[in-house]
Amino acid sequence: MFINVALNIPSNKLFTYEVPPGLEKEVDLGKRVFVPFGNRKRTGFIVGTIPSCDLKKIKRIAEILDDEPLFSQNDLYFYQWIADYFMYPLGKALAELIPSGSEKKDSLWITPMAPETEIPLPLPSAQEKLLAFLRQYPQGIAQNSITKLSSLKNIAQTVRKLHLAGFLTIEKKQNKQLSPHSQTMVTLDESKTAETKLPDKLTDKQKKLIDFIQTKGLISLNDLIEESGISGAVVKKMQDKGIIKFTASEKMRTASFDSAIRQNKNTIILNNRQNKAMEEISCHLEKNIFTPILLHGVTGSGKTEIYLKTIEKVLNSGASAIYLVPEIALTPQLISRVAGRFDERKIAVLHSGIAESVRYDQWRQIKRGLINLVVGTRSAVFAPLPNLKLIVVDEEHDASYKQDERLCYNARDLAVVKAKMASALVITGSATPGVRTYFNARTKKYHLLELQQRVEEKPMPVVEIIDMKAQQEKSGKVPILSEALIAAIEKTLGKKEQVLLFLNKRGFDTFLVCADCGYNFRCPNCAVSLKNHVAEGVVKCHYCDYTIKSLPLCPSCRGSRILSYGVGTQKLEKEIANIFSHARIQRMDSDTTSRKGTQEKILRALEMREIDILIGTQMITKGHDFPLITLVGVISADTSLNMPDFRASERTFQLITQVAGRGGRGNTPGEVIIQTFNPDHYALKHAQNHDYKAFYEEEIEFRKALQYPPFGRIINLRLSSVKKDALIEEARLLGKSAKKLSALRGNIAEIIGPAESPLAKIRGRYRFQMLIKGKDINALHQIARELISKHRNSHVRVTADVDPENFM
């Protein structure tokens, strides 16, 4: 028997291996195998079996790592489509999509000789430097880690020479793998527990143990000791007597459904508009064919209840469903609602905040058919659910559905592809749908359902736009808060209601500069300014996390006049505290929610009215439902408007509308104040009027004129290198090749660039990008593949982002 294996390497090639006779019965598509590759062994996925092979020299697999497959043939078709469309090697895609832990690898383990070992001097400089480095790791270190942690060159060659000289040892080691978690189960031996066969001399504790197990039945050893209060020594004594038996059993690691956010257990009765939408959805469900639906409903119109009712209908029919949300921030409230409605034992939660071991166990439960509902962020779309009949994509417009590194997929689009492959229903829902999604609904590719009013006829919040150009202080500076917003906050606090302030920049200041010499505090690894974090006493880079202590003096001229410009959430928090010293203020951004559980605690405190003013970044704009928030302030609408992206207006409209939608969800009407330097911009005007259709009509004409999506397609080729000169030259050659390839195909694609990326350097790598734009995505794929193949070299990395969302 021979198998085809996809390895986690940057190549689309599959590798064929022979299966030893003893392992043939264990071979199955979707299992991981440990195989020789070069002079080491690596982990791969079985993606096919073949009866014969013409290769003369063929290696044998070393080990099969799984007892059961991690995906089926139908799942593999989906994963292959993803790898092909997003131009990413299948083996690397599988390693990224499937929670199977770190790859099992053979690694070379380098251990230096004891410090007292006599070393003849002088040694060559390279050897001396390597030995000095290794002495920091007396227990040894993996050879590939030396490369990552040091700036040494020719490490493999130097290691070999020192090994031959006897100054260090080399051995092969394997990293620890994720595997099923075993637990000891306890049961009574019935052949020895009949009253006539029990020993006469049993202690009271031993008798109590027998009674306890008879009541409980099969129970884990840990639970037995904890619940019965009987010591492990007594249990062991009873095992020695043969009265109880130990057996090994797999213990499933699960995600917690406990939430600090209170769930509403009241039965929700749908209104007429919701009922009408449900009737249409039910009609499509009964057809059992692929059906894409856009549920366009204003904020607070009851979309979530429609999702849950539809899921309930699907689960009751014996089928399964996936419920996607854009960010982990939305899962506590959602999980609280879902767990209150459905059987927790049949629900899996998948997102990056869950331990890999838990995701691994849940994944296998899903594959076995023991889970029928998966709730999670973008990666949940890959779950191998059998009999899938529904995928819900909540807040479908959100950019968080797009992954920007490595495999650059968009979970919203993949949900549609997966539903089509499974002949399932897919519901994408939003108050502010993506322009491309709404275009699909207008052109009848999707069914359009609309909810144009809030539940219980609650009014939409009143939106006021403040022109910050007219707010200048006597000093000439523009204040952080307008007079109108300060007055509105004071009024809201006076009524014992809550305030939400949105600013999409964390940190204290936007940038720091020396007033004497003009020195700009910039990250040495990235082409961006360092952000001041006053609370921690540091300045840091928001891209690579480079951090240094705040400096009282300029590093360049030693001057003390260091000025700060711009405003971040920390600075806004301080400003609010100065003005409203009596208010209870909380900030919610990635700095304050980095520790597990802190985000949920903040939301719980908001719900319990322990917070008067919540300040936050984009994470506060989505999905949260707190009825006591009656005032929403947008501190700077210009942050997103000024992004170098053709979607800047769309993103701004969505952000403003979504954050405005957090207000007035209770019995008191909401008020929204937007501060901006562009009060006449159409995105803000239409957001003020809650008029998505008017915004769409204006935006779609701009897209059509420039052939941007949905009228054209884009592939962004990203180039990066640690050597700027090599990058500039390769970018020039790439652009030349691209224009030539397009011309040969009748100018089927427009080539934009190559040009330096807006963020020209990140984590020590210089960056360029080039857009390939056209109507035929297959032609764009062909051009991109040829260019990547031709311009791949050791100095410049070229990667593709198909249907890009981020041009930074």
Image (cartoon, rainbow, N blue to C red):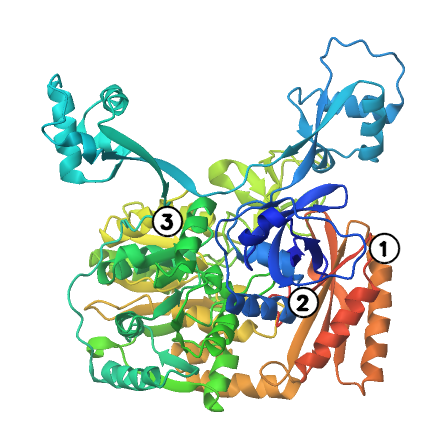
Disc 2 residue type (three-letter): Met
Disc 3 residue type (three-letter): Gln
> Which residue is labeled 2 in the image?
87
User: 145 or 640: which is nearer to us?
Assistant: 145
Q: Is residue 638 visible?
A: no
Residue 597's image quarter? Answer: top left
Q: Secondary structure at mark 2?
A: loop
Q: Is residue 178 visible?
A: yes
Residue 709's image quarter? Answer: bottom right
Distance between the alpha carbons at the discs numbered 1 and 3: 44 Å
Of marks 1 and 3, which one's residue comes earlier in the chain?
3
Tell me: residue 132, above or below residue 705.
Answer: above
User: 195 or 109: which is nearer to us?
Assistant: 195
The residue lying at 17 percent from left, 61 percent from top is 265
The residue lying at 42 percent from left, 45 percent from top is 592
Distance between the alpha carbons at the discs numbered 3 and 2: 36 Å
| Percent of width and height locating residue 729 | 87, 60
Tell me: residue 525, above or below residue 432.
Answer: above
Q: Secondary structure at mark 1?
A: helix
> Which residue is labeled 1 in the image?
726
| Mark whose residue sits in front, 3 or 2 | 2
User: 754 or 213: which is nearer to us?
Assistant: 213
| Percent of width and height locating residue 248 | 36, 37
Quick check: marks 1 and 3 in contact, CB under 8 Å? no
Disc 1 residue type (three-letter): Ala
Q: Residues within 10 Å of mark 2 (few under 14, many from 20)?
A: many
Which disc, if any, is residue 599? 3
The residue lying at 74 percent from left, 71 percent from top is 784
Which disc, if any, is residue 462? none
